Amino acid sequence: MSRRVYIALVVALGVTILVAGTALIVVLRDRGRPSPAALLRPTGIPAAVTTLEANLMALSPVPTRPATPFTLVDQNGRTVSLAQFRGHPIVLNFMDPHCTDICPLVSQELRDAAADLPARARSTVFLAIDVNPYVRTPAGLDTFSRAHGLTQIATWHFLAGPLSTLRALWHAYGIQVIAHGPTADVVHTSLTYFIGPRGHLRYVAAPQVDHTAAGVAFLPPSQLQDWGAGIAAVAASLVR
């Protein structure tokens, strides 16, 4: 890795941590639910999203613009394009099919979100783009999806494709990736984008993870539930 790439990654991760950490450090370290009165409500977020959820998710509106389009292959070997989901709210993540850290937690949040969706938002599409340059086959994506219950989501698609295409999408969506080899852990930015039915970016959130003293990734059950509820509320707000 060049020094320039390394510095860029450190800066990008630092910005993400700074933005998310300001809102989340009390929540993550205290392991509890702070009083809503102790939290500042971010501006520009959907009314249905609670202040607690918004702070936990580091939820923020983004300048409304068309989401960068893509055509990739999902865990079933089917060609999937962003354009085919026009008319539906979209929840877009970036995940590693070999991840044992934050991605399994995000998977649980997505399952909870799908279950929490109100009837009017049941057509919400859940997408994830692969960040592991060494695991890009439908079989690898399907193994992860099944292991973490994501196939329970009717509109779930875990997507991969040519490495050049993936790298372009990582760049377009602000995802930094470090992958030293086929057996090394992939370090990547974790962001959740919310795309409206017209194909425009609307909101972004920053999934977080804590670790036990033994280094095992976890979040308290209450925070996982709040994340699921928050994702569902944002998706539902995009339905008109």
Image (tube, rainbow, N blue to C red):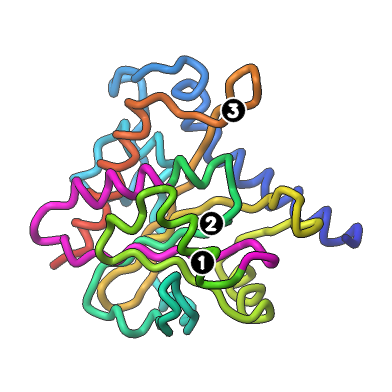
Q: Quadrant of the N terminus?
A: bottom right
Q: Give the Cα distance between marks 2 and 3.
A: 18 Å
* Residue 234 is one of the magenta-drawn residues: no
Residue at 8% in and 57% down:
119
Secondary structure of the residue carrying tag 3 is loop
Crowdedness near tag 2: few (<14), some (14–19) or many (≥20) residues, C-alpha within 10 Å? many
Name above or below for residue 26 compared with residue 87.
above
Residue type at numbered disc 3: Val
Q: Label 1: state its secondary structure.
A: strand
Residue 17 image position (x, y, % from top left) = 61, 40
Q: Amino acid at mark 1?
A: Ile
For mark 3, what is the residue?
A: 216
Seen from the viewer's position, the closer of residues 44 and 136 is 136
Tell which tag, 1 or 3, sits nearer the viewer. 3
The residue beneath circle 1 is 129
User: Hey, which residue is sitting farthest right in the picture?
Assistant: 3
Circle 2 SS class? strand
Q: Amino acid at mark 2?
A: Met
Q: Are marks 2 and 1 in contact (CB under 8 Å)?
A: yes
| Residue 119 shown in magenta | yes
Residue drawn at 45 percent across, 66 percent down: 158
Residue located beneath label 2 in the image = 95
Q: Which residues are magenta?
A: 107-135
Question: Closest to the observer: 192 or 203?
Answer: 192
Residue 113 in the image: x percent, y percent? 27, 48
Inter-mark Cα distance, 1 to 3: 24 Å
